[in-house]
Amino acid sequence: MGTSLDMIDQTYGHLAPDAEEFELGLLNAYDARTVEPAAEKR
């Protein structure tokens, strides 16, 4: 019996309601850190 990510979100999602915003912030910070130096090399 497998567990889908939807089932996990429905079961435990209420424990971290702002997790999606936090994770997007981390990804945006990573993108800003890795993309900007490459743009400066032009």
Image (tube, helix red, strand yellow):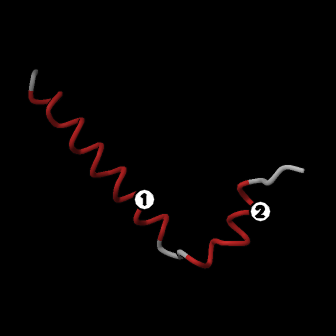
Mark 1: which amino acid? Glu
User: Is 10 in front, or is 38?
Assistant: 10
Q: Residue at x 71, y 63 (%)?
A: 8
* Residue 35 x/y as whole percent: 23, 35
Secondary structure category for the residue under label 2: helix
Q: Residue at x 53, y 76 (%)?
A: 17
CB under 8 Å between discs 2 and 1: no
Q: Tell me the number on the disc at residue 23.
A: 1
* 37 left or right, relative to 6: left
Q: Residue furthest top?
A: 42
Mark 2: which amino acid? Met
Query: In this rendering, is residue 40 above or below 29?
Result: above
> For residue 38, which quarter of the picture?
top left
* 14 left or right, relative to 29: right
Q: Tell me the number on the disc at residue 7.
A: 2
The mark nearer the N terminus, 2 or 1, is 2
Secondary structure category for the residue under label 1: helix
Q: Residue at x 84, y 49 (%)?
A: 2
Q: Residue at x 66, y 72 (%)?
A: 12
Q: CA distance from mark 2 to mark 1?
A: 20 Å
Query: In this rendering, is residue 34 above or below 32?
Result: above
Q: Residue furthest front?
A: 1
* Residue 20 x/y as whole percent: 49, 64
Q: Residue furthest right?
A: 1
